């Protein structure tokens, strides 16, 4: 199993997947930091005009900037998970590269688990390193750090692993293209579910609210982001958001629910077990 | 010593459509076994079942005395697939090392063994190039190296020379000969009947998912003879008598081509001609080639089905 995991990591490195990703990520971060730089200039100018040393609402503004930045990182990291896992089994079967591997003295479960381990590490590392880079850069430039960055990054990383596991499950029985489309649709559904929940509370529609709750448990990706976003907001902002309907479509106002995290853990294990089971039963 | 391969009434149905109807085989250890059949006869499906990639719908199979799902047994099996595609971002050497590790080979053993197999398949000196840059023939060679790297006891070669030129084919024949000399069992799937004829000890012919004939190569080829006769005049009475002894392929007024099922028929043909009063000028027996045997086995079946 570890041989397969190591091989998966080496494959990612060799196929320039990591390189291309890193390049695009640097582009994204550069774009983000340029925005931060412009904003900082604007704040300084306005502080000077008002004769102040610091723009008073700067802290508040940076919080939103970082929140939106990480929102994008979470989205990109999710896509990276889906696209790196989408053909992991099906693509190799379609190409025929897996047949000589599967006739070696290792079980199909080891192949699935090894691939999962290698790609999970990648997906988790991508999400947390990109998110961490964004936080670090912003902190160096303007001195802002959200209240609790580590739990937020951890939850985002968990989200990446969750998406990757679902994609691997799809890859165990669906053709690559179908799986890719399916995963993006699922991802989108989780997202829509979150937005629906907001609208439901806003318009006071209990049925819609129940629907949204169900989607949260069924596809926990959006909920994980909401929990992550809690740790990025100041107590004042959280206080403010608790007064209206629950949160807004982009951020939550409650800390991570341990029961829900347990559910996500069980969800990942179950999806992985199902992937192994399907792949073992299959005629290849 | 268990048989290298033993199957009994192996059957595989894909969504109601049988790919393999009934395949019973027995391959002894150390022999080169040819598995023949037209396209779509069920050869590849059978091989996949023997390798544990596909599960049989019914029937029994044993490879080296165990189930092909048995991990320990797989340590002694090598496989070169027909549609060979490998992780082409690896160099030849890295590819062999990865597969060697999967077989459970030690680093020291791999260092010694990799140059050996590279030499054997004629790729020594090219091992630091990426497989992506290899020609189709070189890819097939590296695939063959992968299949024999760990000195397996049983090797499945599915069309191992499909991408090779005549010289390459000869080299593969030699490698098969070397494997046999080392006591390795070779299960060869091939369309190239002249090659099979030169390399295999025993064959089985499958058609429409069933084994239609199997046996030792020499015996199978001796089973049928084609006899060319020349006489002064071929009377209707003699023609009838000849038809009793064999299958008439063609005839003209002074000769005939007959197919008979054993050499013992030859003196009886001469006797029949003598008794009919005809003068015998020539009686030339000729063994059928494997190709002719194959065509007769496979096309007979087609006709029977059509009837």
Image: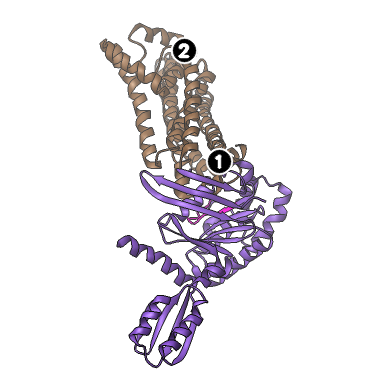
Chain colours: A brown, B purple
Taking A174 as reference, is B278 above or below it? below
Location of residue A148 in the rendering, given as x and y in whole percent from the top left corner: 52, 16
Describe the element under mark 1 as helix, strand or loop. Answer: helix
Vertical arrangement, residue A202 with respect to residue B146, above or below: above
Q: Residue at x 49, y 57 (%)?
A: B82
Residue A133, how many percent across, how many down?
Answer: 52, 29
Residue carrying label 1: A8
Give the side of residue A170 with respect to residue B72, left or right: left
Q: Residue at x 64, y 56 (%)?
A: B29
Q: Is residue B254 magenta?
A: no
Q: A39 or B178, which lies in front?
A: B178
Residue count near mark 2 (Cα–Cα under 10 Å), binned few <14, some 14–19, many ≥20: some
Corner quadrant of residue A212: top left
Q: Nearer the viewer, mark 1 or mark 2?
A: 1
Query: Disc 1 is attached to a residue of which chain?
Result: A
Residue A252 in sight in this render? yes
Q: Is residue B82 magenta?
A: yes
Residue in the image at 45% along x and 47% along y = B11
Residue B103 badge: none
Q: Quadrant of the N terminus of chain A?
A: top right
Disc 1 from disc 2: Cα separation:
35 Å
Q: Residue at x 44, y 27 (%)?
A: A74
Q: Chain of mark 2?
A: A
Judging by the rendered image, the residue that carries numbered circle 2 is A255
- Residue A48 in sight: no
The magenta stretch is B78-86
Could you say which is closer to the camera, residue B234 or residue B209? B234
Q: Main secondary structure of the magenta part?
A: loop
Q: With respect to residue A163, does A60 lie above or below?
A: above
């Amino acid at each position: 199993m570890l041989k397969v995991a190591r091989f998966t990591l080496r494959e990612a490195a060799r196929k320039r997947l990591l390189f291309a990703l890193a390049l695009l990520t640097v582009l994204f971060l550069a774009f983000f930091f340029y925005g931060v730089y412009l904003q900082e200039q604007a704040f300084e100018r306005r502080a000077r005009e008002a004769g102040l040393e610091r723009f008073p609402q700067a802290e508040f503004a940076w919080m939103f900037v970082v929140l939106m930045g990480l929102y994008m990182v979470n989205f990109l990291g999710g896509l990276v998970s889906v696209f790196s896992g989408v053909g992991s089994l099906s693509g190799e079967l379609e190409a025929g590269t897996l047949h000589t591997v599967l006739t070696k003295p290792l079980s199909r479960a080891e192949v699935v688990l090894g691939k999962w381990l290698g790609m999970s590490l990648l997906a988790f590392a991508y999400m947390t390193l990109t998110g961490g880079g964004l936080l670090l850069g912003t902190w160096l430039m303007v001195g802002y750090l959200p209240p609790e960055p580590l739990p937020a990054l951890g939850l985002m990383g968990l989200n990446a692993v969750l998406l990757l596991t679902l994609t691997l499950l799809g890859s165990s029985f669906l053709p690559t293209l179908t799986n890719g489309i399916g995963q993006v649709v699922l991802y989108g559904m989780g997202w829509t579910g979150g937005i629906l929940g907001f609208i439901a509370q806003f318009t006071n529609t209990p049925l819609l609210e129940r629907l949204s709750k169900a989607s949260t448990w069924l596809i926990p990706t959006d909920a994980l982001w909401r929990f992550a976003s809690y740790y990025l907001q100041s107590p004042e902002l959280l206080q403010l958001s608790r007064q209206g309907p629950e949160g807004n479509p982009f951020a939550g106002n409650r800390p991570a629910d341990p029961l829900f995290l347990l559910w996500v853990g069980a969800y990942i294990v179950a999806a992985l077990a199902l992937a192994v089971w399907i792949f073992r039963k299959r005629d290849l | 010593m268990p048989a290298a391969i033993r199957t009994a009434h192996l059957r595989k149905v894909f969504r109601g459509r049988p790919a393999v109807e009934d395949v019973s085989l027995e391959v002894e250890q150390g022999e080169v076994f040819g598995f023949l059949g037209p396209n779509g006869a069920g050869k590849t499906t059978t091989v996949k079942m023997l390798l544990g990639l596909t599960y049989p719908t019914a029937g029994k199979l044993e490879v080296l005395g165990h189930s092909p799902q048995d991990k320990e047994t797989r340590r002694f099996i090598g496989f070169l697939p027909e549609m060979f595609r490998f992780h082409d971002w690896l160099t030849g050497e890295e590819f062999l090392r990865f597969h060697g590790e999967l077989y459970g080979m030690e680093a020291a053993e791999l260092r010694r063994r990799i140059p050996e197999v590279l030499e054997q398949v004629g790729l020594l000196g090219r091992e630091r190039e990426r497989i992506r840059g290899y020609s189709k023939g070189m890819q097939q060679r590296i695939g063959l190296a992968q299949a024999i790297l760990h000195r397996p006891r049983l090797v499945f070669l599915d069309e191992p020379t499909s991408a090779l030129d005549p010289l390459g084919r000869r080299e593969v024949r030699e490698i098969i000969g070397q494997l046999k000399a080392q006591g390795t069992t070779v299960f060869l799937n091939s369309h190239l009947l002249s090659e099979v004829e030169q390399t295999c000890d025993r064959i089985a012919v499958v058609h429409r998912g069933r084994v239609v004939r199997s046996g030792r190569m020499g015996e199978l080829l001796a089973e049928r003879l084609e006899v060319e006769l020349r006489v002064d005049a071929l009377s209707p009475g003699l023609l009838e008598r000849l038809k009793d002894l064999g299958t008439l392929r063609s005839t003209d007024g002074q000769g005939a081509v007959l197919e008979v099922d054993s050499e013992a028929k030859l003196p009886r043909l001469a006797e029949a001609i003598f008794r009919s009063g005809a003068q015998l000028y020539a009686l030339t027996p000729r063994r059928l080639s494997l190709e002719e045997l194959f065509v007769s086995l496979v096309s007979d079946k087609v006709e029977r089905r059509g009837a």
